[in-house]
Structures are given as C-alpha cells and as structure tokens.
C-alpha cells in the first residue's frame, strides 16, 4: 500500500494570522502568551488539514515564528555569538532580535532560499560558536502533535545544507571545518527524537540540487554514517531540481528513504530505479509545490503506477517540495471567477491531490473518481479556453526581433548628457521607491475596493499622500525624489492588475520573510498593456518639485518571478510579453517629461537556474527582456534598476549587460561584502550600495553610514557612487524613516565636504 505525506505546510495561516500576531507582539499590543496561543492554534489546524485529508503522517518542524533556518540554529544552540545570548536560555524576544536587530546589533543577513522568493537568515560561523543545544520548541511541538493523536514526521534542515548556506565570520578556512561540531549537534537532536519515540525524521538537503564540488559531495557519506545509528528512520529530501548525478551517492547513504522532486526534476527517475535498495522508501514529489495550477491527476497516476508495481508500500506520494511556497486554501477565494478558480489548487487542495493519488494507487478508485474526473475536465478546459491567447500579443511577439535592444550611445557618452541634464552633486542621495504605507493609506485603499470611497475621493487622498512624501523628501534634502507609491498595494500586484493575462486572488498570501507576506498574481494568458499605468502619478509628483522625480516600474523578470506563471508555454516567451508591455510604459513616461525611470529587478538573480549548465539560456532571455523594456528612450533619460538580497558575483557580466545607467543594491547587512564583486569585476556604470537595512526598525547612526560609504569608496569611483537605503520603505514607520534618511543625507554631505577638502589640499 502506497503512503502519502508532504514536506511542509504554510505556517502563516489562511488569513495571515501568524503575521498579525507577530507584529502585534512586536508593537507590544499583545503579550507572549497570546502570541504562543496563535501559533498553537495554527499548528493544530494545519495538522488537522493533513490528517483529515488522509496523509499517513503530519509534518512537525515546519512551523517557525520567523524562519526555519533560524529555528534550526536556535535548536542547535548555534545562534550568532555577537549578540551575547545564552543559546540554552534563548527567549522568543531574543529570537526576534536575531532576525530584526536592535540599537546595538544589526540583524542577521538575509538572502533568497535557492530560486524562490522566500528569504532565510544566513547562519554566521565563528570560532566561538557551539552546537551544544538550544531551545526545546521542536520537541514540544512534536509532543503536542502526538497528544492530539497524530502520527508525526519531524522535519529538519540538513546539516550539510545548513553549513553550505552559512557564512564564515572567523575561526576556520572552510565551512566543512565546522562539520564535526555540526554533526555532534545533530546527533544530540536526533537521539533525543529517537528517545521520544519519533519514527521518521525528514532531513532536507536541497544543496544536492546545486553543482557541488568534490569536498561537499564527499562529506555526505561520513555525515550520515555518523547520524544514522543514533537517529530515527531518516528520509533525506532533495528538491528544486534533478539530482541524477547523485544517484549512486544517495543509493549508498545509510538512510531509510529519499525524496525526489519529480516536477522540477523531470526524467531523473530511471537513474534511481536501477539497483534501488529493497528496504529503501522512495518519496515521489509529483504535485507541484511551487505553483498553483491544479494537477493533471490522470497523467501523474500514469507516472506513479509502474513505480507502485515495483515498490509497493515503499512508494510515498508527496508534493515536490514544502507547500510553504503556495497559498493556504482556495476555499477562501469567493470573488475569483469560476473558470479561473477551477484551474487552481492551493496548499490545502494539493494535500488532497496527494492523498487522492495514494488512494488511486491503492485501488480506492471509486472513492476518488469524482476528484479525478473534475481534475481532467478542468485541465482540458484550460487548454482550450479563449482567454489564454491574445492575437495582439502574438503578432507583436512575432515582430520582436525588429526591436532594438540597445540604447543610442554607450554609457560613457550617455552619462555625460545625463549629468548635464540633472546637475547632481557628488554622492547623490535617493530612496529606492516606496515610503511608509500608513494605516490611513491602507484604510483608504480598502474603502475604495469595498466601494465605500468614490474614485475621485480616492485619487485626491493618494495625491495628498504624494504631496506629503515629496515635501518630506525636500525637507530631508534628498537629491533625487520618488513619489512614494501610496497607490500601490504591491510592486507586482499593482502592475498585474492593469495588464491583460494576469488574475488575482483575495487571500492567496505567501510568506516572503518573517512577518512579510506577498500575494502573487497568477499569469494565465498572454500579457498586454491596454493603457498607461503610472504616467499620471509620476507627472503629478514631478509637478510638485524642481528636483528629478524617478518613475517607478517593476521589471519584466520580477513580474514573472513573483507571479505564479502559466505552465503551458516557455517562461522566456511570457517574460518577453511582459517586457513589451513595460516598454510602452517606459516610453510614455519619457514623453511625459520623466527623466529618470527605475525598472526594479530584485528577482533577477532569483530566477537563475540552480545548475550553471542551465544559466546561459536564462541569462540571455532575462537580459534581453530588461533591455527591450529599457531601450526605447533617449540617451539623456537615465535608467535605474534595483536588486536586493542576492549573491550577484557569479552573474556580474550579465548584470552589466543589462546596461542600466544606475544600479542600486542591498549591501548593509553584509557590511558592503556584496559590493566587493562589483569592484573586482570593474562594474562600468553607476552604483548605489545600500547604507542601511530597511527591514530592521533600528535607526543607524551617521557614523555607521559614513563607515559603509568609506568602504564603498574603496571599491567604486567617487563619480559613480550613489547613496541610498537597501530597499523601499513601505514597511517602516515615518519617525524611523525620517530619522534614518536625515542621517543618510548628513553622511553623504559630510563625505562630499571631506572629498572637497582632500581635492583642495591636493
């Protein structure tokens, strides 16, 4: 009899209950007890979803107050030592300080979890770090689930992935030098789980989907030889890509089972089925954990049936990866039209798909026949729907090779014209885009959506906010302004709402990091811009000031990456459709007199395939999509872009090939470390490295920003160095925003004076 499980369930709650509880706790509106009760309610609800659907085990350990990597560090007692916390006495308040920082300490560095839009907190390895044990939360949650009558499977981030994803701050030359300590820490955890009667531990090693060097590959056998004797049965899980090159390694590891992603790793099964051990479970990830389209159950069953004939009860059916990356429950979508809704499946529905496949394999065909029939009808209807293809888009796409992807002149000539036009000072200051979205702004947007506020009243309300933002920026002394984006709910959703081919949910929230949730739109058909989207707002904002006002757009790759993308055509074709739509907007902004246009691409690195062999194709079309968007303007129009929370060094030639006049990047959490690669590469255009972390409520001192700017000057020539925060300020409050930007402007002005004195002295 086949079994069914999932690798993890979303923790935020269908109505973002965890987000609101955590933020209330941060504000002091609720106490620790109320926060913990919310977490308990959500865990129990999500276990019930899994058990009631018919999964054989529920997942324990997928819940986190902020991040699963931070949870693992707290469990092992391996929290950064610079915070001076006692790992064995770590409180929830301490835990949040690690994630968010405080006046004395900057927060832990944050970056993307592989090629997803989820962000994890980067482990910090120092000579004095220990792995001697920390919090008991995992053990308590497992006991909680067992007390409710659930059969459990505990999930852990694997030791080698934890090491690989961290950064050495001091103590050793190579991360693997820490491996003996890490193994000892995991042994203690696994032995304690075994003593508690846990039968299965899912241990995630997603780094196997990367191109690992020999040292990392060689570390797997001794690591798991050391762990297995003291552990419950281990299910080693890989995901996000195929791992066929590791088939022999995985076959020989002393583990009780292996999970494979058969959605992103299509075609890897034959490499594993040859000489598959007779006592080894194979967990088949056949339901897409990264996208929201309903599964074609008949096709999936056809894939699984031969496997089941060979493996029997050693076949476990699952989603491809944790369901963390999709919304919680489609049942809450009451306003989505019936046709589109019929094409979708969220986490709760995907659990049902997994169990339906298990039941069909086990001969319970009558019990699931209605579900299989509904899935087949929906899949067939989607293929032939007239909503999918737009003749206007298809015609324009066929002519795309006739569109120039180059500006008229090279950057060295363009920048001269731009400097003459804008006459900016040395080290010009700007903001990335958004300003605080206050309660009043959110209430006005909600009232407008509910029909409680008229269109004109809403426009006037947002215009007053733009007026306020412009006034505050001028008072602070910024050199290049933004309109603050009060009318925008989200940097992708706002544009998607105005483009054909996009659709939206009411409650399709997904965790991005910590308490930050996003509601990705989904692309179901050809993308087309019927009319201008931002021109009126930018024109109005520019009319309020003599300083340059940046027009703000989300770039084509980010519009693709931060959406749930149609799976019936290649992603590059969808990206080019988006690029053509945005190109029209860029040209219209220039015609309206907007001289600086920022095309944000924070997801550019995120879209990079995990294996370098697959990079060239992606990078070619991603760069082409950006250049199509940006290349239709005159040389004195300055094109900006923004990227954040990613490692860029390995793709710098392609970032340079995008040919943006100014790029702003996140660098403060890494203490300007990310900027080193730009210097070594001799990045040719202007750069604005972030000088303070906008994800933390702390206000950095002027001296901190000056120190970072001096480090940046060691890498970037003065004439090409901009000064800005790491990212937009949407999630911050006005008092901290104003104070931080005032300090930033003062830091830039002080630096200008220092340089001027040095030049005079010379």
Image (tube, grey):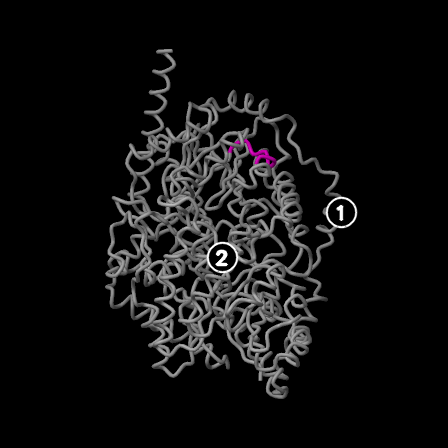
The span shown in magenta is 656-662
Q: Which type of secondary structure does the marked residue at label 1 adopt? A: helix
Residue lying at 40% horizontally and 77% vertically, measured from the top left = 198
Which quadrant would residue 383 be assigned to in this image? bottom right
Which quadrant of the rendered structure holds the N terminus?
bottom right
How far across and down, in percent of the image, does residue 49 sit?
A: 45, 77
- Judging by the rendered image, the residue that carries numbered circle 2 is 219
Q: Nearer the viewer, residue 385 or 639?
A: 639
Q: Which residue is mark 1?
A: 398
Task: Choose between 30 and 200: the one closer to the eye.
Answer: 200
Which quarter of the rendering shows the C terminus?
top left
As measured in the structure, the alpha-carbon distance from the residue carrying label 2 to the one carrying label 1 is 50 Å
Question: First in sequence: mark 2 or mark 1?
Answer: 2
The location of residue 242, given as percent across then percent down, is 61, 60
Residue drawn 32% across and 61% down?
22
Q: Is residue 664 left or right of residue 182?
A: right
Residues packed near mark 1 inside 10 Å, few (<14), some (14 to 19) or many (20 plus): few
Percent x, y of residue 691: 38, 36
Please tell me whether residue 598 belongs to the stretch shown in magenta. no
Place of residue 730 in the rendered image (x, y in percent of width and height, measured from the top left): 40, 47
């Amino acid at each position: 009899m086949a079994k069914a499980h999932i690798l993890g369930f979303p923790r935020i709650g269908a109505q973002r209950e965890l987000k609101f509880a955590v933020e209330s706790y941060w504000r002091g509106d609720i106490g620790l007890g109320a926060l913990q009760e919310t977490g308990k309610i959500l865990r129990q609800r999500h276990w019930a979803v899994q058990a009631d659907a018919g999964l054989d085990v529920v997942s324990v350990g997928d819940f986190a107050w902020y991040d699963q990597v931070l949870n693992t560090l707290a469990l092992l007692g391996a929290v950064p030592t610079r915070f001076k916390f006692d790992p064995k006495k770590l409180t929830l308040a301490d835990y949040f300080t690690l994630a968010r920082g405080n006046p004395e300490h900057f927060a832990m560095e944050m970056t993307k979890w592989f090629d997803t839009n989820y962000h994890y907190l980067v482990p910090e390895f120092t000579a004095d770090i220990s792995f001697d044990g920390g919090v008991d939360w995992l053990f308590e949650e497992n006991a909680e689930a067992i007390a409710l009558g659930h059969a459990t499977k505990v999930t852990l981030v694997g030791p080698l992935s934890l090491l690989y994803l961290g950064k050495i701050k001091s103590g050793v030359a190579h991360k693997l030098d820490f491996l003996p300590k890490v193994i000892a820490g995991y042994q203690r955890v696994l032995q304690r789980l075994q003593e508690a009667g846990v039968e299965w531990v899912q241990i995630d090693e997603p780094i196997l989907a990367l191109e690992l060097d020999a040292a990392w590959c060689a570390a797997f056998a001794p690591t798991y030889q050391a762990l297995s004797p003291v552990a419950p049965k281990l299910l080693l899980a890989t995901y996000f890509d195929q791992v066929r090159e590791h088939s022999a390694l995985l076959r020989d590891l002393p583990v009780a089972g292996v999970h494979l992603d058969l959605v992103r790793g299509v075609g890897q099964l034959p490499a594993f089925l040859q000489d598959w051990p007779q006592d080894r479970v194979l967990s088949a990830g056949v339901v897409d954990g990264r996208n929201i389209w309903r599964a074609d159950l008949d096709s999936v069953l056809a894939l699984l049936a031969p496997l089941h004939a060979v493996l029997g009860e050693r076949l476990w059916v699952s989603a491809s990866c944790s369901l963390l990356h999709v919304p919680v429950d489609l049942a809450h979508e009451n306003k989505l039209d019936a046709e589109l809704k019929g094409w979708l499946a969220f986490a709760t529905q995907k659990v049902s798909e997994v169990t339906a496949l298990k039941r069909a394999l086990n001969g319970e065909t009558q019990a699931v026949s209605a579900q299989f029939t509904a899935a087949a009808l929906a899949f067939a209807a989607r293929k032939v729907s007239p909503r999918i293809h737009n003749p206007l888009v298809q015609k324009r796409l066929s002519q795309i090779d006739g569109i120039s992807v180059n500006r008229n002149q090279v950057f060295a000539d363009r920048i001269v014209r731009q400097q003459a036009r804008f006459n900016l000072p040395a080290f010009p200051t700007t903001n990335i885009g958004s300003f605080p979205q206050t309660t009043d702004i959110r209430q006005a947007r909600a009232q407008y959506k509910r029909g409680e506020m008229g269109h004109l009243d809403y426009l006037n309300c947002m215009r007053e906010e733009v007026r306020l933002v412009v006034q505050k920026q001028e008072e602070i002394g910024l050199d290049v302004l933004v309109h603050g984006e009060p009318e925008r709910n989200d940097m992708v959703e706002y544009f998607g709402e105005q483009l054909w081919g996009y659709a939206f949910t009411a409650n399709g929230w997904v965790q991005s990091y910590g308490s930050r949730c996003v509601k990705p739109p989904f692309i179901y058909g050809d993308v087309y811009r019927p009319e201008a989207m931002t021109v009126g707002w930018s024109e109005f904002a520019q009319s309020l000031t003599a300083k340059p006002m940046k027009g703000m757009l989300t770039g084509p790759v980010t519009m693709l990456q931060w959406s749930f993308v149609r799976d019936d055509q290649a992603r590059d074709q969808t990206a080019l459709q988006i690029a053509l739509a945005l190109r029209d907007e860029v040209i219209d902004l220039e015609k309206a007199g907007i001289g600086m246009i920022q095309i944000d691409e924070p997801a550019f690195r995120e879209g990079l395939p995990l294996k370098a062999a697959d990079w060239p194709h992606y990078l070619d079309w991603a760069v082409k999509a950006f250049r199509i968007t940006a290349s239709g303007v005159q040389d004195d129009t300055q094109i900006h872009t923004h990227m954040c929370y990613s490692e860029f060094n390995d793709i710098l030639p392609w970032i340079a090939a995008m040919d943006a006049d100014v790029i702003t990047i996140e660098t403060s959490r890494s203490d300007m470390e990310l900027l080193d690669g730009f210097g070594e590469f001799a990045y040719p255009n202007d750069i604005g490295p972030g000088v303070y972390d906008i994800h933390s409520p702390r206000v950095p001192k002027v001296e901190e920003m000056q120190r970072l700017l001096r480090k940046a000057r060691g890498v970037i020539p003065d004439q090409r160095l901009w000064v800005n925060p790491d990212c937009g300020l949407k999630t911050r409050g006005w008092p901290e925003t104003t104070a931080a930007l005032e300090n930033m402007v003062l830091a830039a002005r002080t630096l200008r004076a220092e340089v001027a004195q040095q030049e005079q002295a010379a």
